Image (cartoon, coloured by chain):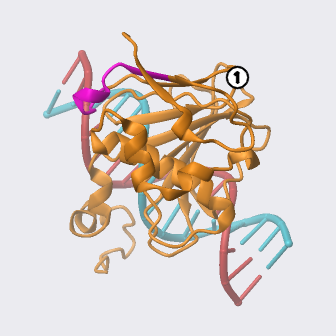
Chain colours: A orange, B red, C cyan
Amino acid sequence: MDHVFSQSNKAIKTSHDADQNSEAATRIRKPRVSVRARCEAPTMNDGCHWRKYGQKIAKGNPCPRAYYRCTLAPGCPVRKQVQRSPEDMTTLVTTYEGSHNHPLPSAAIAMASTTEAAASMLLSGSTSSMEAMNVNNPYLSRLSLEQCFASNPTISTANSFPTITLDLTTNPHLTIKIIASNLPSSHSDTHMQGPTSFLPRINLQNIHYQRHPV
DNA sequence: CGCCTTTGACCTGCGC
DNA sequence: GCGCAGGTCAAAGGCG
């Protein structure tokens, strides 16, 4: 709509139309879900189609961070950032933001459900976050992330964005840790642990909460 | 030919 | 107010 002042000045338009339509949503602090996983490929195959729209060298990390948008449907607000961990170049950190506004292929449902559920969990403010996740996401009881991951999710949040990190890199036990900032107080310093019988299917109902001082 | 990646420029937010 | 860092845009080129 209305970005017609883009004659030769490509950059003049950004903030105005952003104020007025869906882009405005991106200004709000949306919850993010990042996934750490060992992956040799430059990006994980999560079943969605992504289009790269930018790349940056982040300070403190020699590896470039790549920015992708979902192209399964025009106007889909979902974005992801892909970056290798500076400590371990084999670890790929993928951060998802937003939720899909269109039907997903079956291969993408598991991941999308996980990220959206985690986002719901952050937003819900419920102490029993897993309940919130399950209420909002019927797929959670039959997640099958084995396509992309090995086993162990660690969830953590930090910074001004509420962010959950699923750490699937090591760890024999499923560990979900929420180091809250910008979160409902009920989530602060929450540490969840659970069984790791998780390989082919992640059943988040198995995850238990445990208060954990930071 | 259409879609995707690359890349440089620009915008915005934040800290000092 | 200034500078920096992160994030986004869009033109150009490449590839299937």
- When the figure is inspected, residue A142 is found, relative to residue A129, above or below; the finding is below
Residue A168 percent location from the top left of the image: 65, 31
Image position of A21 with respect to A135: above or below:
below
Left/right of residue A81 with respect to residue A164 in the rendered view: right
Residue A89 versus residue A70 in the image, above or below = above
- Disc 1 marks a residue whose amino acid type is Thr
Q: Residue at x 68, y 34 (%)?
A: A37
Question: Residue drawn 45% across and 52% down?
Answer: A116
Nearest the camera: B10 or A54? A54
Which one is nearer the viewer's eye here, A197 or A14? A197
Helix, strand, or loop for circle 1? Answer: loop
Q: How many marks?
A: 1
- x, y percent for residue C5: 42, 30
The C terminus of chain A appears in which quarter of the rendering? top left
Circle 1 marks a residue in which chain? Answer: A
Q: Residues within 10 Å of mark 1 (few under 14, many from 20)?
A: some
**Which residue is under mark 1?**
A170
Residue A43 visible here: no
Residue A54 lies, in percent from the top left, at 54, 52
Magenta-colored span: A181-192
Q: Nearer the viewer, residue A130 or B8?
A: A130
- Compare residues A136 and A22 and report the one nearer the observer: A136
State which quadrant residue A36 falls in: top right
Left or right: residue A40 compared with residue B3: right
Residue found farthest to the top: A213
Task: Identify the image quadrant of the N terminus of chain A.
Answer: bottom left
Asked whether residue A165 is drawn in magenta, I would say: no
